[in-house]
Image (tube, grey):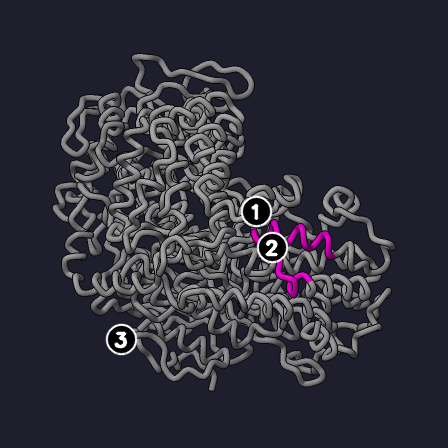
């Protein structure tokens, strides 16, 4: 069977949902086996640097759920520090965040809680693959079996012999000290759960036998990279077996593995995680609205707003394999009773498919309550925050911080302004403010038909709203126009690829080094109808995804950046027309 | 396994004693441990010194915040009138400056970063290096279960002014329930319990840590320099954990004010000022009980963030927005709504200080054995001013510091207070701060020599 046959047949054979199967197959037929072939001539600097990422909170939870079950995962709060958002993604911050001593103590406390549950009466029979000779004494064989199997899943690669031997000795010694085999096992498990091999996803490289002088990720690192990209979870047993068998370094084996994962229901969790991060939905963890101004908005309402958008994204991109750009114009969504009051529509129990009115003002993600409410103040809307979010989240443009030492006295004159537009007009009489507000406000003001909670309004304080605007040269008269201008913006798909590639490779892209790679992905994304699963497949199968950019080339790049520092500065500040620099 | 055996043999004295049973150690009555004047334990060991921080957002309305009088018995203008019940316990510092030098004035960022780290940031992404609480915890935080604790009243896990380094934040406790569980759940040893039962698991944990570190060192070899530094930091954390385990194997000293609290209810998210106050008081009560129980000697409480988004029900501007958009009332001479937010912050500062004073310890209170350093991010937030940034301290640091004073800094660096605090806590620092923020001058007016 050649690779063409294998790829196409494996897609058809493994996918779990018919729609996915069909579309994947069509995508593959259009360019079956092409991504790696297209990249055979690997650029010298292509690839990504070796990275050591801290597990994100969700990845920690997913790891625990995958190895020990959902109930144990739900019982703990992941002991992971908040990440600094780096080039739009918390996930990229995970390659830079440090772990303080206090955090390590939290990691240990959580490890103890997990380990105690794994061996308790409710779980031991199905989480521990053997029964000890006697519960009050050590049993090296049984301990070794459990620790070997569990350690492989937690560390995302097999334990070495000496490592396993050490852990078994800990279990035995602990059993002797406590007089209980299971207590002993839990203490050895604790040791694994505080090990950096679990807490950090550390890329490891090896020489690439097919490309002399170049490095590639070893099979287990590649397995982790693919798995966290597609599922936001560690490799499962099957993927680890494929890594162990060397299959991930063959085109055929890799395609088979990726197609199985794309066909899995777990893809949904991966796509949700990416968009949750991309859209800064972590804000919802502390978001609240003033109950006097917005009495219909409770914590549950806001939770449902987040869920509505994620459901819409998954339905659009995964279930229906639709064009990514249409997310910004689609009227299809889901509705719950808790959200219905904000949308001013009747609704029944539970989540149901819902379609916004054809001629109404709601279409696309920008008109979802999630986007509108998260990018507002607690007591009023904010055209500036909305415009900034649109540019930074979906177009990868960077809106500068407010300049220091701004004189805000003009704002006092805006105290009696009826609308945000009037207020901002006064604000923008200050030239140092106007520059940035002109970048954000025109499109933000177009969303002023929605208040700070995302509810529709005809007027603000009795004054009519002027929602005509402009987005990078495209003028429009209403929300529909803004939605289409966003949908058709030339940076929209490039931005998605930028973020997705960064998300997959564990850190921000380098536009200097990755420019060609990203352009190639974008061209194929367009050719394939802007379908996300096909893009994910393209990235995961690409040669560049597994290739390691050497430190030497990183240093060369940094040197060249230092030499060109003034130009670099000019580039980084130029521009909302271009994408942000790294 | 050689390594483990070697590790274990060092602790042979405990081997066998733990197996299959517990060691019970009878403890004497509490006050027996104190000397006659209540400042030290009978065996000569002093009552521990503690260091705390407290933070509020967006500075002050100078005309109604800064007292006319300096020194003792200073007047309390209306914005700080809530401090009256605790005035004797605190010092107010005004006319101290934060210097940005050639760095930009990063709105709501430069002020707190300088006061906590001594260094003016050059970009918003520049978080502080090591903050003052971390330096002090390294000095005085090694004898307790937690080297330091941080908590926020905002309910937002991202709100912390405690950093080990630019990329390493000490995550604050944000949920009262979770905080309670961390303090008084698994691993808590009641210092006043009549018996002491060493947990045999602790010994195993301690030994296992050595093996974990040894094996994981192999991982380090394959990493680049920056990642190696991050992993080294993790190993430092593991070594610190090992020391904490050591402490759990010894009987804790009794603490007269230590009482295990009832488990609290959790609170909804939100920044309504009443809700923030409720959360602040719950977190304060938990935090200070942890201090009273000697779970930690370094503690950070965060009332509001630098961009404080606290809200007043029905008013359309959160605190930060109000500072910029509200006009200064020409008759009053200040921004009334903005001042309302600052007054709420001062009420909570008063609660915090009073709560410390309420814990009896020896002949005095927990506050008497503490030094609390309270800072904000701006002086006049409307203009993002950092000149004349106000600060407070509370407590007398075990009789080393006078309280009840208003100190005029005369335009000297605000870092002097942080420098003074470090010296009080026993750090041998000759200078602190960078460029114009550098100081080697303590605030002598408050020191008892």
**Stretch in magenta:** A144-164
Q: Secondary structure at mark 3?
A: helix
Q: Are marks 1 and 2 in contact (CB under 8 Å)?
A: yes
Specify the label residue A240 is tagged with: 1
Camera-side residue of A50 and A458: A50
| Marking on residue A158 | 2
Q: Residue B78, position in %: x, y?
A: 37, 55
The quadrant where residue B194 appears: bottom right
Kindly identify the residue that appears in the image at 56 percent across and 68 percent down: B147
In the image, A477 versus B226, the foreground residue is B226
Residue that mark 3 sits on: B435
What is the crowding at mark 1: few (fewer than 14 residues within 10 Å), some, or many (at least 20)? many
Q: Chain of mark 1?
A: A
Q: For mark 3, name the chain.
A: B
Q: Nearer the viewer, mark 2 or mark 3?
A: 2
Q: Residue at 45% across / 32% down in the picture? A: A7
């Amino acid at each position: 069977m050649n690779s063409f046959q294998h790829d196409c047949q494996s897609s058809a054979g493994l996918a779990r949902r018919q729609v996915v199967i069909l579309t994947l197959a069509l995508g593959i037929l259009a360019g079956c086996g092409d991504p790696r072939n297209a990249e055979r001539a690997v650029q010298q600097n292509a690839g990504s640097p070796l990275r050591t990422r801290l597990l994100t909170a969700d990845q920690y939870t997913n790891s625990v759920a995958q190895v020990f079950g959902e109930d144990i995962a739900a019982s703990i709060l992941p002991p992971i520090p908040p990440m600094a958002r780096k080039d739009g993604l918390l996930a990229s911050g995970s390659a830079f965040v440090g772990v303080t001593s206090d955090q390590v103590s939290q990691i240990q406390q959580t490890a103890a809680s997990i380990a105690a549950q794994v061996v308790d009466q409710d779980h031991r029979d199905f989480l521990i693959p053997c029964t000890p000779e006697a519960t009050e004494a050590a049993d090296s064989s049984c301990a070794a079996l459990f620790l070997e199997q569990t350690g492989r899943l937690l560390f995302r690669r097999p334990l070495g012999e000496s490592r396993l031997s050490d852990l078994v000795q800990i279990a035995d010694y602990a059993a002797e000290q406590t007089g209980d085999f299971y207590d002993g096992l839990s203490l050895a498990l604790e040791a694994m759960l505080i090990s950096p091999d679990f807490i950090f996803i550390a890329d490891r490289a090896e020489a690439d036998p097919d490309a002399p002088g170049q490095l590639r990720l070893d099979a287990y690192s590649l397995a982790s990279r693919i798995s966290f990209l597609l599922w936001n979870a560690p490799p499962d047993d099957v993927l680890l077996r494929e890594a162990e068998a060397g299959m991930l370094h063959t085109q055929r084996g890799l395609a088979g593995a990726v197609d199985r994962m794309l066909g899995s229901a777990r893809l949904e969790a991966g796509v949700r995680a990416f968009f949750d991060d991309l859209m800064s939905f972590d804000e919802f963890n502390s978001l609240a609205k003033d109950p006097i101004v917005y009495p219909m908005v409770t914590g549950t309402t806001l939770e449902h707003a987040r869920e509505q958008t994620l459901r819409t994204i998954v339905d659009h991109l995964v279930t229906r394999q639709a064009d990514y750009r249409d997310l910004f114009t689609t009227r299809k969504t889901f509705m719950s009773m808790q959200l219905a009051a904000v949308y001013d529509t009747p609704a029944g129990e539970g989540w149901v498919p819902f379609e916004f009115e054809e001629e109404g003002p709601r279409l696309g993600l920008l008109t979802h309550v999630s986007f509108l409410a998260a990018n507002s103040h607690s007591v009023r809307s904010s055209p500036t925050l909305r415009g900034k979010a649109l540019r930074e989240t979906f177009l990868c443009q960077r809106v500068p911080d407010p300049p220091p030492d701004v004189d805000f006295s003009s704002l006092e004159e805006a105290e009696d302004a009826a609308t945000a537009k009037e207020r901002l007009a006064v604000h923008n009489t200050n030239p140092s403010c106007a520059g940035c507000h002109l970048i954000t406000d025109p499109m933000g003001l177009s969303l002023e038909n929605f208040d700070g909670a995302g509810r529709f309004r005809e007027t603000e304080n009795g004054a009519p709203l002027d929602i005509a605007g402009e987005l990078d040269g495209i003028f429009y008269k209403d929300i529909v126009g803004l939605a289409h201008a966003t949908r058709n913006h030339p940076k929209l798909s490039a931005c998605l690829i930028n973020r997705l590639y960064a998300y997959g490779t564990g850190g921000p892209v380098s536009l200097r080094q990755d420019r060609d790679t990203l352009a190639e992905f974008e061209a194929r994304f367009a050719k394939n109808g802007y379908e996300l699963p096909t893009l994910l497949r393209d990235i995961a199968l690409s040669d560049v995804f597994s290739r390691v950019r050497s430190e030497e080339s990183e240093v060369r790049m940094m040197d060249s950046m230092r030499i060109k520092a003034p130009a670099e500065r000019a580039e980084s500040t130029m521009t909302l027309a271009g994408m942000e620099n790294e | 396994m050689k390594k483990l055996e070697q590790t274990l043999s060092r602790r042979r004295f405990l081997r066998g004693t733990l197996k299959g049973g517990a060691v019970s150690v009878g403890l004497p009555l509490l006050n027996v441990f104190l000397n006659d004047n209540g400042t030290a334990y009978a065996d000569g060991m002093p009552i521990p010194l503690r260091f705390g921080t407290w933070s509020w957002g967006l500075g002050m309305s100078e005309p109604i915040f800064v007292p006319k009088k300096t020194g003792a018995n200073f007047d309390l203008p209306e914005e700080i009138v809530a401090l009256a019940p605790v005035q004797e316990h605190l010092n107010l510092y005004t006319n101290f400056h934060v210097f940005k030098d050639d760095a930009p004035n990063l709105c709501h960022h430069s002020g707190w970063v300088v006061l906590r780290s001594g260094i003016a940031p050059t970009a918003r992404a520049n978080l502080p290096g090591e903050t003052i609480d971390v330096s002090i915890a390294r000095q005085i935080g090694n004898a307790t279960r937690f080297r330091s604790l941080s908590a926020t009243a905002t309910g937002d896990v991202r709100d912390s002014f405690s950093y080990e380094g630019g990329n390493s934040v000490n995550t604050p406790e944000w949920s009262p329930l979770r905080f309670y569980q961390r303090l008084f759940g698994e691993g808590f040893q009641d210092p006043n319990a009549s018996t002491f039962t060493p947990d045999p698991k602790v010994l195993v944990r301690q030994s296992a840590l050595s093996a974990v570190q040894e094996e994981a060192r192999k991982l380090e070899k394959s990493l680049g320099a920056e990642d190696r530094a991050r992993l080294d930091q993790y190993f430092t954390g593991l070594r610190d954990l090992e020391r904490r385990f050591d402490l759990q194997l010894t009987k804790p000293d009794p603490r007269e004010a230590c009482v295990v609290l009832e488990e609290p209810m959790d609170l909804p998210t939100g920044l309504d000022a009443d809700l923030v106050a409720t959360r602040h008081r719950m977190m304060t009560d938990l935090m200070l009980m942890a201090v009273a129980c000697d779970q930690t000697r370094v503690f950070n409480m965060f009332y509001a963030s630098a961009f404080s988004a606290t809200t007043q029900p029905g008013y359309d501007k959160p605190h930060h927005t109000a500072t910029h958009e509200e006009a200064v009332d020409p008759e009053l001479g200040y921004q009334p709504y903005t001042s309302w937010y600052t007054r709420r912050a001062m009420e909570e500062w008063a609660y915090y200080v009073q709560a410390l004073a309420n814990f009896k310890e020896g002949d005095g209170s927990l506050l008497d054995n503490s030094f609390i350093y309270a800072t904000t991010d701006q002086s006049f937030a409307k203009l993002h001013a950092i000149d004349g940034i106000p600060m407070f301290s509370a407590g007398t640091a075990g009789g080393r510091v006078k309280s009840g004073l208003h100190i005029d800094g005369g335009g000297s660096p605000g870092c002097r207070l942080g420098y003074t605090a470090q010296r009080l806590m026993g750090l041998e620092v000759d200078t602190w701060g960078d460029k114009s923020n550098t100081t080697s001058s303590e605030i002598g007016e408050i020191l008892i020599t």
